[in-house]
Structure formats: C-alpha cells, structure tokens
Image (cartoon, grey):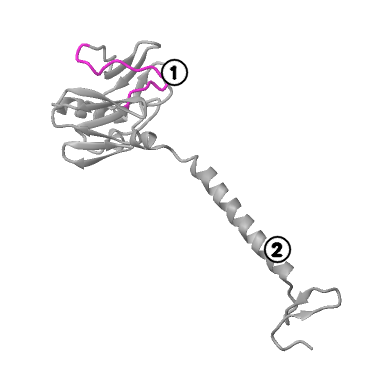
Amino acid sequence: MAQSGSPAVSADGTRKHPDGSTRRDFLYLATTAFGATGAALTGWAFIDSMNPSADVLALASTEVNLAAVQPGMAITVTWRGKPVFVRSRTPEEIAKAKEDDTAGLPDPQPDAKRVQKPEWLVLLGVCTHLGCVPLGQKPTDARGDYGGWFCPCHGSHYDTSGRIRKGPAPKNLEVPPYAFTNDKTIKIG
C-alpha cells in the first residue's frame, strides 16, 4: 500500500501522483515550455534584425548652424539623402510672401503655416512635379517670376515661401519637420 503523498504504481507500471499527474505529463509540459521559449527568442531576433542600423539612424536628423547665414543668403544641407533649402529671408521677402497669401495659389497655404520664424524658411529642395532640384539657392541662379525658386526642367515657379505659383508642379515645396534648438541652430528630422 502506498503512503499518502507518494506516487502510486498503477497496474500498467506507471507511477501516478495523488493529483493524477504522471512523470510523462511533466516532460510534455517542460518540453513545450522550452520549445515556446526558443521560438520566441528566434522570433525576437528576426524582428529585431528589421530595425534600422546605427548609420541609418544617424541620418534621421541633421543639425544646422545658422550663425553664418545672413539675411538674403541661402544654404543647402542634406537630410535623408535629399537637399534641404534653408533661407534667411529679408524683410522684403517676408512682406512679399505675406502679401501673396491672398493670391490665387494652386496649392493654397499661408506663409505663417510654412515657417516657425518668419525670417527663416526651411524647405525640401525637390520639385513636386518630377523630383528635380530647383534653382534659386545661389545669388546668380534664376529665381523665377516670383523671386523664390525656378525649376528649369519643366518651368515651375515658386515664390519666397516655396509655394507653387506657375508651371506643372501640383504642390508647394515640402516643409520638412524641424525645430529650433536655440536662436541659431535648427534640427531637421
């Protein structure tokens, strides 16, 4: 006769605990838990391999020092492999951009929605028609009929706020996500 709390031997020779479980039940549970843990770790390694690498994350944002950029000057920086136009607008350019808010624009957007500080304009330098890089960053470049940028490939004209005014481009030059980290530095992205 088996003692209370110790396994009992059945007629077929298997040992059963008082709660009805066998050693085989324990092995099934342990094997299943071990297999599930291995599958989870393998799945995690696979999913983690899809995260961007460190060099890609480094390109996710760009800091730009604006200290050397005088009113009327423009610089071009690269963010995510695309040119970004940063222009220090003169009071005349700001006034013209605000005046043009009421003009018949193909893609209406007020100047105030396109800038964080009126004197600084930050735009992706990619024409919205076919992805060309418009002229207008250098003082010697053609700036089109509206004093902003001109895409010579198909004749799109942008104003001093980067809004499309004439030509086949359907949209304004895009404003990338950016923030001023201080008075003379912006972080794009």
Give residue 72's position: percent from left, percent from top: 16, 23
Q: Amino acid at mark 2?
A: Tyr
Along the horizontal axis of the image, is 6 left or right of 88?
Answer: right
The quadrant holding residue 53 is top left
Q: Residue at x 43, y 19 (%)?
A: 129
Tag 2, which secondary structure?
helix
In front: 103, or 93? 93
The nearer-to-camera label among 1 and 2 is 2
Q: Which residue is mark 1?
A: 130
Q: CA distance from mark 1 to mark 2?
A: 62 Å
Give residue 153's position: percent from left, percent from top: 39, 10
Give residue 56's position: percent from left, percent from top: 39, 34
Magenta span: chief secondary structure? loop
Figure check: 127 above or below 47: above
Q: Is residue 128 magenta?
A: yes
Q: Is residue 134 magenta?
A: yes
Figure check: 75 above or below 9: above
Q: Residues within 10 Å of mark 1 (few under 14, many from 20)?
A: few
Q: Residue at x 37, y 30 (%)?
A: 108
Q: Please state the extent of the stretch shown in magenta in the rendering.
A: 124-140
Q: Which mark is residue 28?
A: 2
In front: 6, or 179? 6
